[in-house]
């Protein structure tokens, strides 16, 4: 007869959730009781799960299935009433968010390290989403972290978890394990937001697309939505079978890691539209024929033209972007006379604005865009909104971008990442720069003069919560800007992110290479922060 086991344990250092949940090397998560401690801390940090309904699923990366089984056994032992699980333990992050909302669940556990590689030598992650379907707020993650520091025992059901390969219901003690099809609810939601008939007709008329699922979770969703429901030619979805190590690749939809898609889109016989998504399906990359669209520009175009899709026909209540994201969307919001909020990096900061109805569309430079339909960023949603806009306007991607820049000006933008930098060196760089901020205004660096410089902090306009230390900003007198912050999603050393932006309104200068257009800002911020000297690098590891 199976029963609840109460296992003594001790706190494990370093279980502090980052930008989006706890991310560590897979081998760290696999070493008991690492996962068990963290799951118990989540359950206790949210005030217990007795009688609750939880959604559980992940992106299918290595260790996903075993971790789901542990979570189910611990949920049962902690008194949860029901766990709704995607078949095979699979759920994209936006699909999980939707399921929490649709089923009125009390929350969910999402297993993913997002765009980080998967496999025994790579990364794993776990995050808790609340009843609104969104990532836990800072207040909740602080409570979870506090529990990891004083945990003394965890509770786990002694027997095996039921088989989650088959749709249907089973019991684990008193808890119901409900295994559902992970695709249908999400696909139906997409069909309710967009003009599928118009997109279908556009595809039938010869419009060609290529969606690269990067061997990750969106493959099955994209096959169903793009090929089955919208009639894209079979083979339009590539790398569409999820694998535990993402085919040995790096499931991050940017021009570096999605180079296969970039090559296809810059080839002579390129399709009309290309897109990719990441490990857990919340990020997106948009690329037209010979035309990569930066995430900040994508957000601006979507904000400008979302009303062409039925789900947004009434217009937008407001928009929000993370601070390092370019101000391209601000210009659209100003023209439309709607609010534009600037939040810290991390989708969790959009939750209150979406819940309060103050923002309809949100986005980040890190390839995330989404709306109030769920409480996560949503890769396929962005792809479908683009397709809806392209079908409604009959224009191509590069034509739309040219129109947009001609009307609003172009916020040239790029992010330079320095990965696996020595943590001490990275922290010292930021600390020294912080100390230097008051002295910067008026100083000249190459062609640029500093106008003002500060460290971003945020007061949530809905609940009044305060988040400090959210990135260093240097503004130049010509309207250019550089931002520096350390990533909160890496698992080895520190990743220094340098975000570069310069506004151009001269019609003759709207079609430059961003690295050329940003050359003065790149030089100035290196002189200010000593990036090359302190990191010992001659250049960034990744440029997006
Ligand atoms: C996560 C967060 C995003 C954030 C991104 C980058 O994305 O959900 O809000 O913009 O990390 O964060 P950082 O610069 O701290 O690495 P994902 O797709 O990894 O969940």
Image: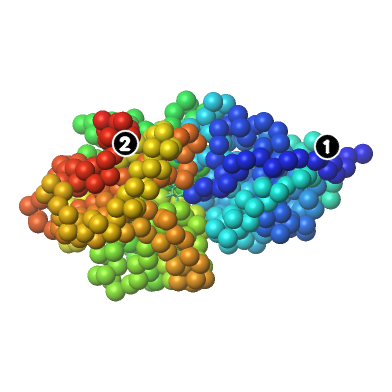
Dot 2 alpha-carbon crowd within 10 angstroms: few under 14, some 14 to 19, many 20 or more: some
Q: Quadrant of the C terminus?
A: top left
Q: What kind of element bears circle 2?
A: helix
Q: Position of residue 325 (x, y in %)?
A: 33, 54
Q: Quadrant of the N terminus?
A: top right
Q: Is residue 401 left or right of residue 253?
A: left
* Disc ID at residue 95: none
Q: Is residue 424 left or right of residue 95?
A: left
Name the residue carrying label 2. 534
Q: Is residue 505 left or right of residue 143?
A: left
Dot 1 alpha-carbon crowd within 10 angstroms: few under 14, some 14 to 19, many 20 or more: some
Q: What kind of element bears circle 1?
A: loop
Residue at 32% x, 59% y is 454
Name the residue carrying label 1. 159
**Rendered image quadrant of residue 195:** bottom left
Pick the front one: 225 or 462 = 462
Q: Is residue 77 at least partly visible in the picture?
A: yes
Q: Position of residue 449 (x, y in %)?
A: 15, 55
Q: How is the image coloured?
A: rainbow
Q: Is residue 335 above or below residue 376?
A: below
Q: CA distance from mark 1 to mark 2?
A: 53 Å
Looking at this rendering, what residue extends furthest in the bottom direction? 337
Closer to viewer: mark 1 or mark 2: 2
Pick the front one: 175 or 445 = 445
Looking at this rendering, what residue extends furthest in the right direction? 1
């Amino acid at each position: 007869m199976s029963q609840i086991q109460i296992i003594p344990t001790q706190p494990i250092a370093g279980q502090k959730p980052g930008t989006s949940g706890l991310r560590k090397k897979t081998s760290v998560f696999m070493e008991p009781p690492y996962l068990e401690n963290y799951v118990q801390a989540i359950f206790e940090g949210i005030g217990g799960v007795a009688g609750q309904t939880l959604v559980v699923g992940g992106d299918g990366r290595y260790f996903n299935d075993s971790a789901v089984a542990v979570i189910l056994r611990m949920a049962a032992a902690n008194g949860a009433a029901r766990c709704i699980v995607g078949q095979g333990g699979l759920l994209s992050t936006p699909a999980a968010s939707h399921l929490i909302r649709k089923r009125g669940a009390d929350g969910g556990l999402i297993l993913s390290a997002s765009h980080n590689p998967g496999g025994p030598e790579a990364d794993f992650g776990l995050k808790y989403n609340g009843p609104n379907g969104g990532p836990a707020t800072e207040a909740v993650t602080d409570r979870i972290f506090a529990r990891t520091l004083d945990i003394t025992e965890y509770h786990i059901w002694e027997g095996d978890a039921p088989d989650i390969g088959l749709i249907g219901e089973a019991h684990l003690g008193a808890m119901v394990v409900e295994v559902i099809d992970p695709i249908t609810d999400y696909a139906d939601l997409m069909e309710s937001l967009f003009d599928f008939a118009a997109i279908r007709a556009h595809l039938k008329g010869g419009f060609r697309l290529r969606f690269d699922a990067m061997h990750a979770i969106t493959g099955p969703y994209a096959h169903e939505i793009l090929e089955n429901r919208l009639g894209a030619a079979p083979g339009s979805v590539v790398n569409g079978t999820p694998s535990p190590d993402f085919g040995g690749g790096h499931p991050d939809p940017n021009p570096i890691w999605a180079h296969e898609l970039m090559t296809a889109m810059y080839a002579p016989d390129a399709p009309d539209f290309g897109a990719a998504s990441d490990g857990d399906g919340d990020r997106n990359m948009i690329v037209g024929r010979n035309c990569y669209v930066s995430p900040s520009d994508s957000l601006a175009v979507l904000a400008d033209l979302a009303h062409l899709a039925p789900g947004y026909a009434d217009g937008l209540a407001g928009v929000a972007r993370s601070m390092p994201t370019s101000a391209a969307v601000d210009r659209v919001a100003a023209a439309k006379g709607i609010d534009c909020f600037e939040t810290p990096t991390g989708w969790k900061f959009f939750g209150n604005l979406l819940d309060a109805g103050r923002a309809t569309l949100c986005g980040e430079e890190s390839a995330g865009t989404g709306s109030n339909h769920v409480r996560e960023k949503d890769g396929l949603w962005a792809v479908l909104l683009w397709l809806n806009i392209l079908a409604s306007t009959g224009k191509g991607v590069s034509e739309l971008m040219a129109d947009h820049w001609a009307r609003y000006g172009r916020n040239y933008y790029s992010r330079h990442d320095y990965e696996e930098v020595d943590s001490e060196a990275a922290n010292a760089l930021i600390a020294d720069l912080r100390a230097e901020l008051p002295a910067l205004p008026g100083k000249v660096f190459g062609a640029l003069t500093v106008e003002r410089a500060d460290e971003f902090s945020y007061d949530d306009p809905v609940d009044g919560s305060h988040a400090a230390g959210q990135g260093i900003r240097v503004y130049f007198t010509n309207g250019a800007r550089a931002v520096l912050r350390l990533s909160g999603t890496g698992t080895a050393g520190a990743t220094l992110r340098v975000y570069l932006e310069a506004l151009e309104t001269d019609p003759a200068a709207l079609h430059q290479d961003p690295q050329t257009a940003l050359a003065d800002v790149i030089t100035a911020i290196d002189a200010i922060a000593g990036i090359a000297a302190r990191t010992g690098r001659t250049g960034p590891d990744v440029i997006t």
